[in-house]
């Protein structure tokens, strides 16, 4: 999980698994949204990561779902840190 706390007291969080620290444990959630989507492309037989669910082209794809999750974690760790 990556959490960035802002001067106004708000936080931006990226979490793959909220069982580690449930976001509600640190305060009231006012907005929660997905920042990426991983879907299976049956024609190409790969998993695809998109930052916009309506985008034509994925930002990353791989036959392995776990590889897509790992790419997603690395990408957002670098963006949010």
Image (spheres, rainbow, N blue to C red):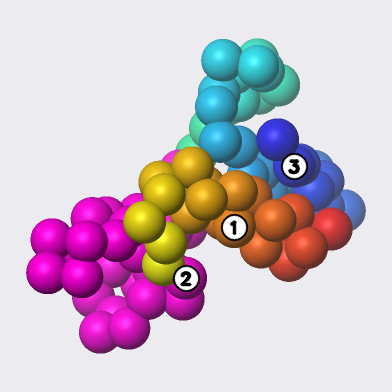
Which mark is drawn over residue 2? 3
Q: Which of 52 and 40 lies nearest the eye of the viewer?
A: 40
Q: Which residue is mark 2?
A: 60
Task: Give the quarter of the figure containing the N terminus.
Answer: top right
Label pair 2/1, CB-CB below 8 angstroms: yes
Q: Residues within 10 Å of mark 3 (few under 14, many from 20)?
A: few
Sequence-wise, the earlier of marks 2 and 3 is 3
Residue under the image location 35 percent in, 64 percent down: 48
Q: What is the x, y in percent for residue 27? A: 66, 23
The numbered dot on residue 3 is none
Q: CA distance from mark 2 to mark 3?
A: 21 Å
**Residue drawn where x is 28% and y is 68% of the image:** 53
Q: Residue furthest left?
A: 43
Q: Closer to us: mark 3 or mark 1?
A: 1
Quarter of the picture containing the C terminus is bottom right
- Alpha-carbon span between mark 2 and mark 1: 8 Å
Residue at the (52%, 50%) spot, across then down: 67
Q: Answer left or right for 34 relative to 10.
A: left
Q: Which residue is mark 1?
A: 71
Residue 59 among magenta residues: yes
Q: Which stretch did the figure color magenta?
A: 32-60
User: Which one is nearer the viewer's eye here, 68 or 19?
Assistant: 68
Q: Give the residue drawn at x 41%, y 67%.
A: 61
Labels 2, 3: front one: 2
Q: Position of residue 55 (x, y in %)?
A: 29, 80
Whether residue 40 appears in magenta in the rendering, the answer is yes
Q: Earlier in the sequence, mark 2 or mark 1?
A: 2
């Amino acid at each position: 999980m990556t959490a960035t706390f802002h001067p106004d007291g708000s936080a931006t969080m990226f979490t793959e698994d909220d069982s580690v620290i449930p976001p509600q444990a640190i305060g009231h959630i006012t907005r929660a949204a997905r920042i990426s989507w991983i879907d299976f492309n049956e024609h190409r037989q790969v998993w695809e990561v998109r930052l916009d669910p309506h985008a034509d082209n994925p930002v990353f794809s791989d036959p392995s779902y776990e590889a897509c999750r790992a790419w997603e974690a690395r990408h957002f760790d670098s963006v949010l840190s």
